Image (tube, coloured by chain):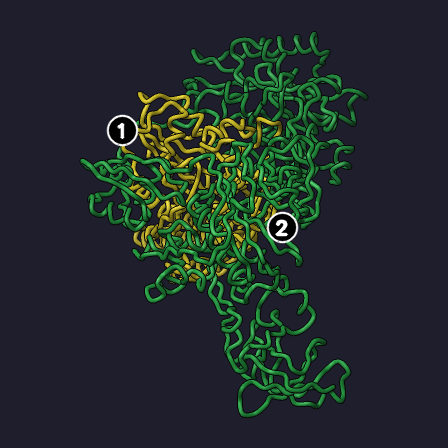
Amino acid sequence: MLVSLNWLKDYLDVETLPNAEDLAHQLSVRGGLEVEGIEEIGDFENVVIGYVESKEQHPEADRLNVCQVNVGEETVLQIVCGAPNVAAGQKVIVAKIGAVLPGNFKIKKAKLRGVESQGMICALEELGIDAKYVSDEFKDGIQVLPEDAPIGKDAMEYLHLRDTVLELSLTPDRADAMSIQGVAYEVAALYGLDPMEPVATYPGANSNQEVLTKVELLTEKCYQYLAKVVTDVTVAPAPQFIQSRLIASGIRPINNVVDITNYVMLETGQPLHAFDLAKFTAPQVIVRQANEGETIVTLDEKERTLTTEDIVVTDGEKAVALAGVMGGANSEVDAQTTTILLESAIFAPTSVRRTSNRLALRSDSSSRFEKGLDPEMMIQAIERAAQLLALYAGATPTKDIMANIQTEITNPTISVTITQINQKLGVVLTQDEIEGILDNLGFEYTVENAIFAVTAPTRRRDIKIVEDVVEEIGRIYGFDNIPAILPSLEITPVQPTLLQSLRQEAQATLAGVGLQQVVTYSLTSPKSVHTFVPENRQLAAVSLMMPMSEERSYMRQSIVPSLIETIAYNQARTQKNVAIFEVSRVYGQTQETTLVEKEHIALAATGDWQASMHDKQAVDFYTMKGMVEALLVNYGVMTAITYQRSTMKDLHPGRSADLFLDGTYLGVIGQIHPQTAKEFDVDANIYVAELDLSLLATRVPAGMERITYDQVSKFPSMTRDLAVVVGNDVLAQDIVQVARQAAGQYLTTAHVFDVYAGEHMPVGKKSVSISLTFNNKEQTLEADVVQNATEKVLAALATELNATLR
Amino acid sequence: MSEQHTLLEELLATALVEVQTDDLKSLNDVRVKYLGKKGPIQEAMKAMKGMEPEARKEFGQLVNTVKGQIAAAVENRLLELEQAAIAQRLANETLDITLPAQNLHTGSIHPLQQVVDDITAFFRSMGYEAAEGPEVETDFYNFEMLNLPHDHPARDMQDSFYVDPHRLLRTHTSGVQARTFESRTEAQLPIKVICPGKVYRRDDDDATHSHQFMQIEAFIVDENISMANLKGTLQALARHLFGADREIRLRPSFFPFTEPSVEVDVSCAKCNGAGCNVCKQTGWIEILGAGLIHPNVLTMTGFDPQKVSGFALGMGVERIAMLKYGIEDIRHFYVNDLRFLNQFKR
């Protein structure tokens, strides 16, 4: 909402009105009407009205004219002008030497192709008026003023184009501030002023009863409807002040009738519509719900197909307007119009909103209807329009109004105690103070036994409940004046949930081992939605009904694709070593369309790991495995983890593993498949992992509970290293497993520490070295006990894995 | 007598010169040569046997003196050589201590997560528990239970991504409010919850808009929660985030789920309120929205607004991070350029 201060001053005592900055501050901080900007229009001097006494062709330039212009001073100014429409005998706008026009354009004495020019004849655009507001007549040239424009007078003053405009950003509840008068009421409340309440008067002729048959409402969605016929209308340009105020408010002037309806809408907040009554089949108004499939051509010359949800204004035969949204082309006011029917009505807000939303037809009018209107302004608006039409369109209005009030619009009376007000605000206001605030707001009230009964005026349709009244009192009193006091409540211990703890620990652990956390978008492309999701675990995808792009149309089921894209982005910017992780939800739905949101942790790394000048090692499968295990060790679940070769199609079949937690699928680790790498347009040297954090949160004990203490043995341990030759396909995990089972009660650890294949090794075979450590907590181990156990291990390895001692 | 004296003294002089060798082996040779069993000192000892007691005593003292001096010289030289050897080794081992380290490169937490963690910790310290809700939310919890019925004009404020006619990607974290209230009774008061999470709106991504962003919401319900309590909490939060000398300012605003509703400004940390480019010359920066929980929200979830009241506040995590660090483009958070992220290491 743009508010012209010139206009606002019509409703407030100019003497008491504060400056624009203070006004803007108070409106924002106490008014609840946020001022986003203050614009000065026409804020420059030395621009006056001139009279073109003569025009001659420039001797050196075909397109330039040399004009002698009288600006009411002793000397006539010689001005070189390039506008095609300049002519002798015109009144024009002259920027004299010394003027500084918008864009810091300084007017100086100049020579144009050898001819001296002492100023500039201006178009409105050069005075800072947007081209869209300039009438077609002057679009390609200078602005020509009416013949009676006084020579020498300040042109901006004359054009009513020197103004200060406040740009308000309104919240949806403050429909009352969508008008100059509404803002005037708010300013009055803030400063304790008396707003003027104008009464429109004009010489009226006939009664509407004589010229209209009826106003009939066949739908309850039209609450109230006022009609007034105005005859003898002469359609012409509106007076300059109306045009200028419309321009300041962001509306393009058209003609006096349209401009006056717009002007009154801005002034009162009540949208008006003017029909050409001669285009009605019968002089009557019937408002009804549209028929399914009914069509109407609206003023923008588009045919609209309607549903029974829409409301139409008809003349009994045809729809002449889409109520509250836009008029019909069939009843449009044109240059020949002489008799108009003015409409001032209130339609059901939700109905107007649905219609304008469905047809994507939002207008200044619909945005007001859909927020609810004030019946008092409805009457004032139609009378004000009649007055302005009489004054500026030579019209004769009827002397009364034909009204059909189907639904009364009133505000509730709200009962609120002084205690309630003070408790909710946390202040100590007296009855007198509250009364003073309500007086300023123009609210009606009675008080009895410290209980207020408050009724807001109908322009404040947002004041419905106790809290609304409390807010009004609070903001006028000033939120600045409310003390800041922390709540004092019962103390209760707060614990993060296990999932929250695990997430926090994952962040700390993974960042600690050298991975950078990233946050990427949840929405992905249909192509990526099931990438890096095991085929037997893919859920039905969650997709958007109306995505903004295909690239962001599905909710992801794996984080890995986003991580690969992040790697690609960084590699393209010469960041070759990338190690990242993300903790995020993934989304899917089961067959029963039940939504599933699970939390995952994904890792991705490529390039060198911990690279420095001293040492560097390329990231490989085991690096990624190490990172994952760092996390699993922290969670205390490492002993419950088993690995199996993964069959995920997006991973290298020989360099990928599925992880199982006590036999339940937990996630996957691997190098990306060359084919997948190609699809992502990245190098295949990327290693990824993804774990189901939600599953971990059901299996991992809370932090301190993960630890079991085992007394450190007083007796020395004995270690035996064995190298066994096995088939290439035998997994280290299986060797350790067999050794563990065979080694007996004194085995404490068993791990593989070397693998060798190649020279001196049969084809298809490898040598695996395993280290077994034994300890007895009761006494020093005897060598033959260890020897015995070692032999059992070798025997078991031979039987189960066909292993031979190297 | 004097001849032997002279010989011994000459012997001593020669030995002291020979001791000044530069390597351990020749030093040992010198020691053996003079002090060994076949050396001149031993020879001299043997020669003493035939002397008169008086002369023997005198000569014996001389021999011992010479022997002691040679032994000491050898010992000294040995120490000198060892120290020289150590010094030499250390000199050889000298490093350029300004060369880069062997990295123990650590990663860091994403800046948005850092802000979330920080604000969560701040509220936890005051007894708020962290709650989470679904990101694909029902229209019911995202809108209706928050006093945003169908056709409410405020639904314009947040155009949303629907996945079907009844479910959408949540446009705010406030659905957690409705879900929390619904799961509790008045016997479980006070309710103090902080709720961080991802939210989604139909915005074209540009420097200040993102179709996905993070929000943190805090809410409290008990008897007699007032605007003063909200203001106290906001002030503490603003000072925690932006410095102990920050002031806050509440401006009336509108949210369907709070009444009264306020926008909260914090005094500009850069100019201290004097006006600068950061605060667009106003001295104030808008950081969040808040208000007392709307009685309709309480009623719909089974609480009696006559008996209990509460406040809610919600902020954009990106906005907080952008203000705190002067980050100029919201897309940085989601592009994850390492050159951006690495700056948030601490």
Seen from the viewer's position, the closer of residues B308 and A703 is B308
Residue at the image position 63 percent from the left and 33 percent from the top? A290
Q: Nearer the viewer, residue B18 or B343?
A: B343
Q: Which chain wears yellow?
A: B
Residue B30 appears in the rendering: no
- Mark 2 or 1, nearer chain start: 2
Quadrant containing the N terminus of chain B is bottom left
Q: Which mark is residue A440?
A: none
Most extreme residue toward the right, as rendered? Answer: A763
Where's residue B313, x and y in %?
40, 39
Q: Does residue A384 appear anywhere in the picture?
A: yes
Q: For the residue marked with disc 1, what is the amino acid?
A: Glu
Q: Which residue is at a point 44% across and 44% down the rendered structure image?
A: A374
Chain letter of the residue beneath label 1 in the structure image: A
> Residue A615's x, y, as percent?
62, 44
Q: Is residue A202 left or right of residue B235?
A: right
Query: Which of B30 and A174 lies nearest the eye of the viewer?
Result: A174
> Which residue does the numbered mark 1 point to in the structure image?
A490
- Colour chain A appears in: green
Work out whether residue B81 or residue B151 is closer to the camera in this orientation and state it: B151
Which of label 2 and label 1 is nearer to you? Answer: 2
Q: Secondary structure at mark 2?
A: strand
Report x, y in % for residue A686. Answer: 69, 36
Tell me where residue B314 appears, x and y as whole percent: 43, 39
Distance in Å between CA atoms under marks 2 and 1: 70 Å
Q: Chain of mark 2?
A: A
Q: Mark 2 is on which residue type?
A: Asp
Rendering quarter of residue A11:
bottom left
Residue A276 is marked as 2
The answer to whether residue B5 is above or below residue A364 is below
